Image (cartoon, rainbow, N blue to C red):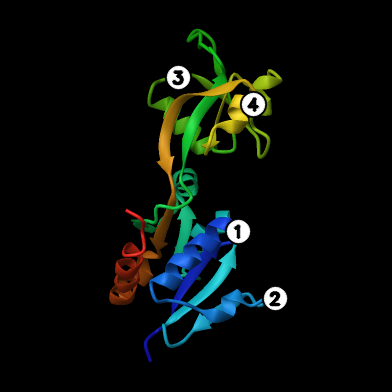
Amino acid sequence: MTDMINIALPKGRLGDKVYNMFERAGFECPSIREKSRKLIFENTEAGVRYFWVKPSDVAIYVERGAADIGVVGKDILMEDKTNVYELLDLGVGRCRMAVAGPKGFSYDRDNELRVATKFVNVAREFYASSGTDIDIIRLNGSIELAPILGLSDVIVDLVETGTTLRENNLEVIEEIAQISARLIANKASFKFKTSQIEHIVQKLEDTIDK
């Protein structure tokens, strides 16, 4: 029997969208739709085994080999620099990584720029490329509050519609990167299960809205 491909899916809305893509591609697993406390779902005929994990943990499961492939946001790959192969842009979960701040904000380069973000590595790398001196303030939630309350000058965060920014008199100042869900693979798994993984990639490509 062919080895099963272990697939780590992110919990939540993105994971549901991604599983739908796998299903349309011919890698369905009916038990995943059932209400249960099961953690692992498999379809031996299709040769796939799925499990749900926290979105920020998907890349770790893949990098460490507990999953052969997985789906993760490009933002997490940029921040964590995980040692995996990025195989395919799935075209879902689209948003952008951006610098935002108060409307009309201008930066005095003689002063250190205070940047609030949970994407510490992304922010550091982005500003290092322009030689900007920054003070990073690590926050995990409600990042838009930081410039409003004077904790930071700007924020680096994901922006989907921009509604939250506009409602709080903030705006995008610079775009850093386009973000979407990416299919990733464990490097050893890709070496030893190349044909199976490439077959999945090919079938998934056919489900992507062009």
Query: Do labels 4 and 3 touch, CB within 8 Å?
Result: no
Which percent across, then down, holds residue 83?
A: 41, 55
Q: Residues within 10 Å of mark 3 (few under 14, many from 20)?
A: some
Describe the element under mark 4 as helix, strand or loop: helix
Question: Residue at 64% across / 32% down in the picture?
Answer: 143
- Look at the numbered disc 1 and give the secondary structure of its residue: loop
Question: How many other residues sit within 10 Å of disc 1, few (<14), some (14-19) or many (≥20)?
Answer: few
**Mark 3 against mark 1, which lies toward the viewer?**
1
Q: For marks 1 and 4, give the CA distance.
A: 26 Å
Q: Measure the C-alpha gap from mark 3 to mark 1.
A: 37 Å
How much space separates mark 4 and mark 2, taking CA atoms? 39 Å
Name the element at disc 3: loop
Residue 169 sits in quarter: top right
Judge depth for marks 3 and 2 and give the one in front: 2
Q: Is residue 108 left or right of residue 86?
A: right
- Please state which of residues 139 and 128 is positioned toward the viewer in this rendering: 139
Residue type at mark 1: give it: Gly
Instruction: Please name the residue that numbered disc 3 is placed on.
Output: 132
Label 2 Cα crowd, 10 Å radius (few <14 / some 14-19 / many 20+): few
Q: CA distance from mark 4 to mark 3?
A: 29 Å
- The residue where tag 1 is placed is 12
User: Which amino acid type corresponds to the residue marked 2 in the rendered image?
Assistant: Arg
Q: Residue furthest bottom?
A: 1
Of the numbered discs 4 and 2, the one sitting upstream in the chain is 2
Residue 159, how many percent across, how many down?
52, 36
Kindly identify the residue that appears in the image at 42 percent across and 82 percent down. 47
Camera-side residue of 24 and 56: 24
Q: What residue is shown with label 2?
A: 37
Residue type, mark 4 in image: Glu
**Residue in the picture at 36% in, 69% down:** 188
Mark 3 residue type: Thr
